[in-house]
Image (cartoon, helix red, strand yellow):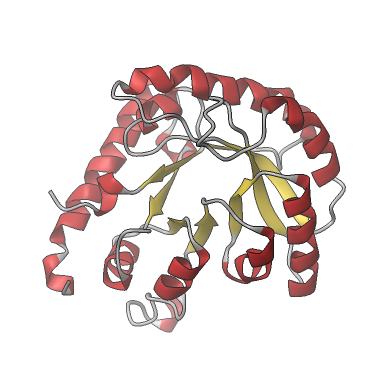
Amino acid sequence: MATNDLGYLAANLAEVRQRIAAAASTAGRKPAEIKLVGVSKTVGREEVAEMGRLGLRDFGENRISDAEARFVPSPFEDLEAEADKISPTLHLIGHLQSNKAKRAVALFDIVHSLDSLHLAQTLDHQAELHGKRLPVLLQVNVSGEESKEGMHPTELPAVVEAVLKLAHLELRGLMTIAPNFADPQQTRPVFQGLQQLFEQYQPLGPQWCELSMGMTNDFEVAIEEGATLIRVGRALFQAN
């Protein structure tokens, strides 16, 4: 798709930002407390570049190979002067197999989907080899759906304790995926459950600061329940 056909992206981004602001107002929060992660898994480099030009700086990908195709080399290189280079933050939001940890650490700035101690240890080793400290979130299957990835809430204490001892991971918070209900209000107990788990670990300090929950269908409810990261794809990238 040619760049001059992408005008709908600006309208989509404006509408999503308005929805964020309205949900934040309902919850007595500031819109700046919520980071919008554009889930770019269904689009090409042109759409990603245009969203960057429009000011979106956070992008989420489910698969490493897709992310490499879209972001290597950077799709933003021709958009800005060198002094104003666009530097996006890449979020891995999909399930990660341990044998792909090396590629994930090389490409992504934060991993939302850490769901086992074994994966944590593998990421820590690769982060050490890459000379970086990798921010991570623990994915929790709050809803209990068998089709959803993530650890059971009862596993969380032991995993938190172990991950905190890994020198090359920075544990920032929690992530969940709610069931795809027709009525977004039905997701509220799931988001409340994750928020309650999150609160239990507030004594960890300022690094414990992120709740990744909410997608196109339900992100307003997630914001009302404390989300700091929302993962939005269709509402941003789908043409009307």
Front residue (pair 37, 44):
44
Quadrant in which residue 207 is drawn: top right
Quadrant of the rendering where the N terminus is positioned: bottom left
From the viewer's perspective, tell me whether residue 239 is left or right of residue 43.
Answer: left
> Which residue is painted at 16% across and 53% down in the image?
239
Is residue 179 at all visible to an observer of this figure? yes
Quadrant in which residue 45 is drawn: bottom left
> Which residue is painted at 66% across and 24% down in the image?
197
Instruction: Give x and y (percent) for residue 74.
Output: 43, 77
> Which residue is painted at 47% across and 64% down in the image?
88
From the viewer's perspective, tell me whether residue 104 is left or right of residue 20.
Answer: right
Quadrant in which residue 84 is drawn: bottom left
In this view, the residue farthest toward the right is 165
Vertical position of residue 68 compared to residue 146: above or below:
below
Instruction: Give x and y (percent) for residue 76.
Output: 38, 75
From the viewer's perspective, tell me whether residue 172 is left or right of residue 32.
Answer: right
Vertical position of residue 35 compared to residue 55: above or below:
above
Tally the marks: 0
Instruction: Give x and y (percent) for residue 51.
Output: 30, 61
Front residue (pair 162, 13):
162
Is residue 85 at all visible to an observer of this figure? no
From the viewer's perspective, tell me whether residue 54 is left or right of residue 167.
Answer: left
Instruction: Give x and y (percent) for residue 53.
Output: 30, 66
